[in-house]
Image: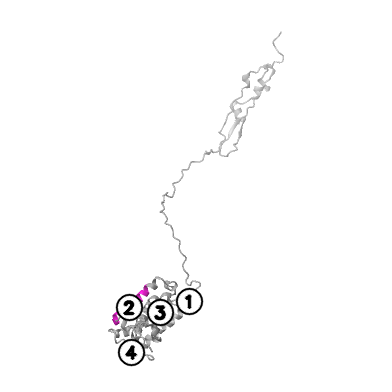
Amino acid sequence: MSSHNTRDVTPDDFGPDDVPSYSSRHSRAEANTEAFPSAMSPNEPTEQFLRADPAPDELLAQTEHISEASYATPEPTVSYSSVSHETAAIDREPAYIAPADPLYEETTVVSAPVAAVEPVAEAESATPVGRGTMDFGLLLLRLVFGGYLVLSSLMTFFRLGNSAGIGGLESEFANYPFGNGLAIVIPTLELAAGVFLILGLITPVAAAVAVAVTGFTALHTITASGLGWNPLYWDASIWLPIVLFAVALTVQFTGPGFYGVDAGRTWARRPLASSWIWLLVGLAAAVAMWWFGTELNPFTSESLPTPTTS
């Protein structure tokens, strides 16, 4: 049997016009290359992929006994010569920024122990509630008592009314070693005490002066009367200095009230220590004037009167 197959293709079956002409493999590869731009960024390089279509001469040369080597696909080539895009380097990781130094300094503050705060008592109101007419009564008492002292002193200094003046007072104190001095001191103290009591100014001091002068006058009246210390024999002229002395003691303990210059003072709201202190001062002044001015003991038995029987 002949090994020649009628279906086999021989070179004689083709003419010169049947064989096409092809360029070189390198030019063919460049012609079959397509450029695919990157969708990420225009600045990134463009990748080119080679079309893997087989050449026509290879298709014609295939036979039924095509070897496995004829199916080898040419490796794709990448050409960046036709791309003129600039490449930008993108750093995907953020740059590490060191923290800035703190603008403050940490200091340790040690607080001192806080002392216990004592509760503060509510301030007393300038005009306490519930005094009623007390302040008005104290005003009348000051005006009457102070007015009497001022009027008595002015009558003595200027010989007003039926007053004998300072001369008559000196004659009254003639039996005392310092009668002339007492005749001037007594009306002077009366005038000072009366003015300050009317105004309600430094009332504890004014009341102490009034205690001293009325106390001396009361002792003088009792001693000069010759009736002694038996109140059953006293008339109105003896009781008047005693009542004035009691009024001076009353003003010393009550204070001036709120109708006076001392309205904002403690002794106007609630006199306590000042009343006792200035009371002792006034009594000491009365005793000193009597002891050093008269040099008499008003409590001796010779001065007591002898009761008369009918």
86 left or right of 158? Answer: right
Provide the residue designation for mark 4. Answer: 168
Q: Is residue 194 visible?
A: no
Residue type at tag 2 = Val
Q: Identify which residue is drawn at 59% across, 32% down.
A: 48
Instruction: Report helix, strand or loop for mark 2.
Output: helix
Q: Are marks 3 and 2 in contact (CB under 8 Å)?
A: no
Distance between the Cα atoms at labels 2 and 4? 23 Å
Q: Position of residue 179 (x, y in %)?
A: 29, 85
Can you identify the residue that label 3 sits on? 246
Disc 2 residue crowd, few under 14, some 14–19, many 20+, Cα 10 Å: some
Which segment is the magenta one?
277-295
User: Dot 4 lies on which element?
Assistant: helix
Q: Which mark is residue 287?
A: 2
User: For the view shown, which residue lies furthest in the bottom direction?
Assistant: 162
Residue 258 coordinates in the image, percent (x, y) = 46, 75
Query: Mark 1 or mark 3, which is nearer the start of the sequence?
Result: 1
